[in-house]
Amino acid sequence: MKTVAFLCFSFLCSRCTLCTSPSDSLETKSVTDVYEYLWENNKCIASDTIEVDFLQEMQNGSLQAERYVSFTMQDINYILNVTEMLKEMSTKVILPVDLRNFMIGRYSSYKKYSDLILNQFFFTREPTIRPIPAMTKYLSFYRNLMKDDPVYFAVGLLPCERLWGWLAENLNTPPTTAYYFWKVENMGGHPEKHYRALLNKYLNTPKKVGKANAVFRAQMQNEHDFFFSS
Ligand SMILES: *[C@@H]1O[C@H](CO)[C@@H](O)[C@H](O)[C@H]1NC(C)=O
Ligand SMILES: *[C@@H]1O[C@H](CO)[C@@H](O)[C@H](O)[C@H]1NC(C)=O
């Protein structure tokens, strides 16, 4: 991983294309923890993301309130859509039982959160929000994942959960600024509780790990592009 970080840095990697070649690293060593591997292998997209001006301005408190409101609306659209997809996945996936329980668990958690957020903003029913292009791209990637082996839908969900927690921990937002709340609210999630065992169990061949890496990377990039466009 040291070499990877160095490569990213030395080429000022902006899209992670030069960072790693997953097939190389897969050939030279077997992956023991796929959950960690996916993150480590694509962490340079996280480093790129934290540098976008939206997050930098959030950190130093200079972000225009209107931009934050627009971002929040897009995020509500994201949550509503992903909750809807999880609802479908939780009825569609019957077997294996642990994957089914994962979908049911994620659906119930997303549903609880979307109800909370609609209530917080006084919506009496689900609003129709026009997505920005970055959001349309992100959600259509999700929709395509629904047609595949459900384990890849789980992989596709992970970048959001892992990245937001990482951003919250790594933004040095002072407690006295408006966006400190965002930091605190997104800190301390534990995605590993839901994902680690599941991904490590089902992503058990180099081919599956390679495919999972492509899905994970695309969704990390979609997260980046959402922040970049916000
Ligand atoms: C806050 O961050 C932005 C983006 O990096 C920068 O352009 C701006 O000058 C900073 N403002 C303050 C007050 O530090
Ligand atoms: C979000 O979900 C609604 C309801 O299913 C759908 O009409 C809308 O097109 C979706 N938006 C995006 C960007 O996928």
Image (spheres, rainbow, N blue to C red):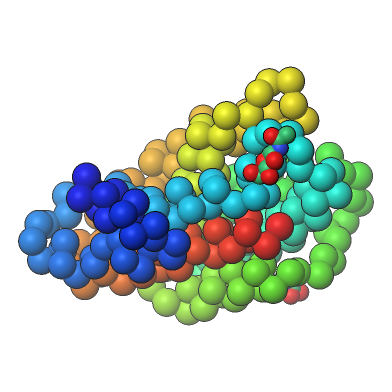
131 lies above or below 117:
below
Number of residue marks: 0
- Please state which of residues 166 and 208 is positioned toward the viewer in this rendering: 166
Is residue 4 visible to us here?
yes
Q: Quadrant of ligand 1?
A: top right
- Please state which of residues 15 and 79 is positioned toward the viewer in this rendering: 15
Estimate the x, y position of residue 112 in percent, counting from the top left.
Answer: 68, 44
Point 72% across, 49% down: residue: 114
- Please state which of residues 86 and 78 is positioned toward the viewer in this rendering: 78
- Please state which of residues 141 and 46 is positioned toward the viewer in this rendering: 46
Is residue 153 visible to us here?
no
60 lies above or below 41:
above
Residue 39 as seen in the image, left or right of residue 54: left
162 lies above or below 151:
above
Point 63% across, 55% down: residue: 227
The residue lying furthest to the top in this view is 176
Residue 108 as seen in the image, left or right of residue 176: left
Q: Quadrant of the C terminus?
A: bottom right
Estimate the x, y position of residue 92 in percent, counting from the top left.
Answer: 51, 70
The residue lying furthest to the left in this view is 28
Point 84% across, 66% down: residue: 128
Estimate the x, y position of residue 96 in percent, counting from the top left.
Answer: 35, 62
Point 53% across, 40% down: residue: 167
Estimate the x, y position of residue 58 in percent, counting from the top left.
Answer: 69, 39
Residue 126 as seen in the image, left or right of residue 53: right
